[in-house]
Amino acid sequence: MNKIFLIKNPELFQGEKYIKTGKHYFEGWYFKNTNDENGISFIPGININGQEENAFIQVITRDFSYFINYNIDDFKYSFKPFYIKIGNNFFSKNSIHIDIKDDTKNLTVYGNIKYSNGKNIATNLFCPNIMGPFSYIPFMECNHAILNMKTRADGLININHHKIEFNNGIGYIEKDWGDSFPKSYIWCQGNDFQNSNASFMISIATIPFKIFHFKGVICDLMIDNKEFKFTTYNHAKLIKCDVNDNVLNIILKKGRYSLNIKSKYAVGFKLFAPVKGKMEKDIFESISTSIIVTLKKDNVVIFSDTSKNCGLEIVHN
C-alpha cells in the first residue's frame, strides 16, 4: 500500500508490513461512546514483540476495564472499505459490532452501535491529521490520529446483562500506532458539553526525537463549525501543566488566544499500553471525568463550558 495514501487515510491499518516480521510494533483504534449518564470505550488492536504477535480488545466503562487477548490470525482488515475485525467483533467509522465472551473473566459483551453525522478536524497536505507535518516523519515512537472528532452514536451494548443504550448518543474515534506509548503524557477528550455544541481533545507528551526529547502538544477545540488548534507545529506555547492532588490545570497560548483546561481526575481503571510492541505498561483511564474548558481572545472569555463523560489519562515516568 502506498505510504502517502496511508498517511492521508490514517484510519487504515498502517502495520501490514510488520506482520510476521517480528519487529516491535503496535496499532490500536479507540472507539468512545457516551450517553447522558454512561459510557463505554473499546480499543481493538494488535501488538508485535519479537516472535510474539497478538490481537486484543480492551473494554473500559465507568466501573471496570478488561483486556481480552486474541490470536493474531483472528485479526482481519480491509482498506476499501475500511474496517477491522477481531474474532466476531467488527469496527469501522460507520458502525461497530461487539461479540465478546470470555469465561475466564466472566465477561460477556455484545451489541451494535451505528455512527452518523460525523465531524472531524480540518486537514490539508501540510496537516494530514492532528500531528501535522510530524505525520510524515517515519521514526516517530508513537503516531496519533483523530478519525472522528464527534459523531452521533445509536445502538445498544449489553455487558454482563447490563444494558447501555445510545439514543442520539455521542461517539469519538481516534488511533495510535508505532513502537511504544510515550513514557509520560496527559491525554483528555470530551464531547458532552453542557451548553454548547463543542468537542475537545488534548495530548501533551514527552516525545523522543533522535538524540533529544521535547514536550509535544496537540490540542483541538471545535465549537460548532469553528476550530481552534493549539499544537507544537503551529507555535502554540505550553504556559502551565500542573497536576496536584489529582487536579489538572493546563494553560496554552497561541497568538491572541489562550486556552485553559481544568479537571479533577475521577477514578480510573487499568489498561495496558505498549512498550517496544509488548502490552506491558499499566495506565489508568477514567471515562467519567468532568473538565472545564475556557477560551480567551485578548484576555476576554469567548467560550467557557463544562464537559462530563470525559476520557482522561495521566501517565508519569
Image (spheres, rainbow, N blue to C red):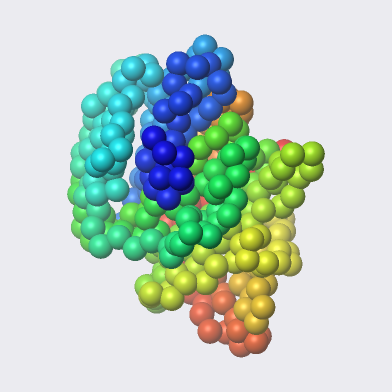
- Rendering coords of residue 128 (x, y %): 47, 55
- Rendering coords of residue 154 (x, y %): 21, 54
- Disc tally is 0
The answer to whether 1 is drawn above or below residue 296 in the figure is above
- Work out whether residue 185 or residue 256 is closer to the camera in this orientation and state it: 256
Place residue 191 in its image quadrant: bottom left
Q: Is residue 91 left or right of residue 251?
A: left
- Rendering coords of residue 275 (x, y %): 61, 28
- Work out whether residue 162 or residue 152 is closer to the camera in this orientation and state it: 152
- Rendering coords of residue 5 (x, y %): 41, 45
Q: Visible in this render: residue 60?
A: no
Q: Quadrant of the N terminus?
A: top left
| Residue depicted at x 60% and y 81% | 296
| Residue depicted at x 27% and y 24% | 87
Q: Is residue 258 left or right of residue 29?
A: right
| Residue depicted at x 34% and y 63% | 119
| Residue depicted at x 53% and y 16% | 22
Place residue 234 in its image quadrant: bottom right
- Work out whether residue 207 or residue 79 is closer to the camera in this orientation and state it: 79
Q: Is residue 77 left or right of residue 242?
A: left
